[in-house]
Image (tube, rainbow, N blue to C red):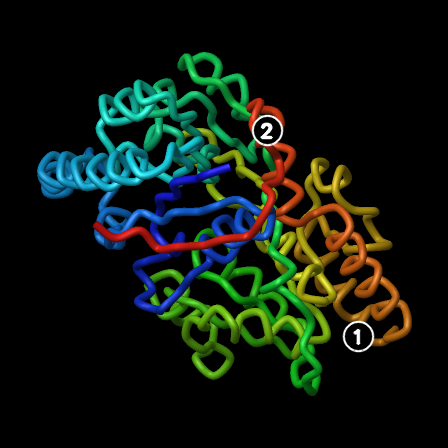
Amino acid sequence: MRIFYASDTTPNPFMGLESNIWRNNLLLPMMDLGHEVLEFDYDMSETFQKLDDLQPEIKAFIDENRPKVTSALLDQLKTAHRKKPVDLFFSYFYDSCILPEGVDEIKSMGITTANWYCNGLNMLRYVSEISPRYDWCLVPEKDRIQDYFDMGARPIYCQEAANPDFYKPYDLPVEFDVTFVGQAYGERPQIVRYLLDRGIDLKVWGPRWGDTGAEGVVPADIVAGPLEDLDLVKMYSRSKINIGFSSVWQPVDTGERILQVRLRDFEVPMSGGFYMVEYIEELEEFYAIGEEIVCYSSREELADKIEYYLEHEDEREKIRKAGHERCLRDHTWQKRLETSFEKMGLPGRGKSSLFSRFKR
């Protein structure tokens, strides 16, 4: 199958790092499946940073920029299609990335269209305009499937995963008791503070830990900046315990915490790390809880289990290995994409592996 792929390289362009998270997790597994992949040759970083059209300055940027991106995309895609028919247009796009008419024009060429999006629980409005125009929407949030149907879209449930060619164990000294790699927001600084007060030796890496709300709560000496992609993967091997947070949003009007299965829930075990994350019922569909990963339901339980597993290395090692084996068996992007393509009526696998970066 011949695929034209379009996205920014990272979900976090604001961090200012050279990151290829989405290429590592989406584009490269398509190649591994033997498909011919052409990549949209366009710098999408600013487009991915300016999404909120409720802000006048950002809306003005979107109104000017979206037609430009759409025109460049159609130009490159049409040229590629003339050379040899493209079977699938696959994107990670927001409304701000493409005009709905642009999606329609791609479909008019006989090309199947699919959009992957993983922030639907708290930011579904950012794709509400374009989603109904795609043939398919790949959705990792089960609770949003009906919302996609309600807006006239055709969702396919596709949970996140990890590419084992990139996320893998490294033979490195284990230097840290407990680590977290990710942004500071919501309740995270307060939980980190609680763990420190319990006497747990914890280090965190990521942006915004010095922002208002985190500054003064989390001491500067346990905080470091964002990690490059490979350093992030290696950190999972350098830590006895890697922790994760499942809360992604807490609306002011209801105060109800929004929980979601995250990319990290597959990255850490795939990288061979011991993983401890807040319990969500959906996690039981992917792991044997307590045997392949460990879950907690409160900060007190998190601290108790950290202390327990730091003292019981044999149990920790058994769970770590089992989690890694489960990910290799069931939770690769290669398997997720192959299944999704088959649901679309497309070939799950190709005959050969070929990658080329398309240039006009």
Q: Residue at x 54, y 38 (%)?
A: 257
Which amino acid type corresponds to the residue marked 1 in the rendered image?
A: Leu
Which amino acid type corresponds to the residue marked 2 in the rendered image?
A: Tyr
Q: Establish if 215 lies above or below 55.
A: below
Residue 134, percent from left and from top: 39, 23
Label 1 element class: helix
Q: Residue at x 39, y 26 (%)?
A: 111
Q: Establish if 313 lies above or below 244.
A: below
Q: Is residue 73 left or right of residue 177?
A: left
Label 2 element class: strand
Disc on res. 157: 2
* Crowd class of label 2 (few under 14; some 14 to 19; many from 20; radius 10 Å): some
Q: Earlier in the sequence, mark 1 or mark 2?
A: 2
Is disc 1 in contact with disc 2, using a CB cutoff of under 8 Å? no
Q: Residue at x 24, y 27 (%)?
A: 102
Q: Nearer the viewer, residue 162 or 88?
A: 88
**Residue 122 image-quadrant placement:** top left
Disc on res. 310: 1
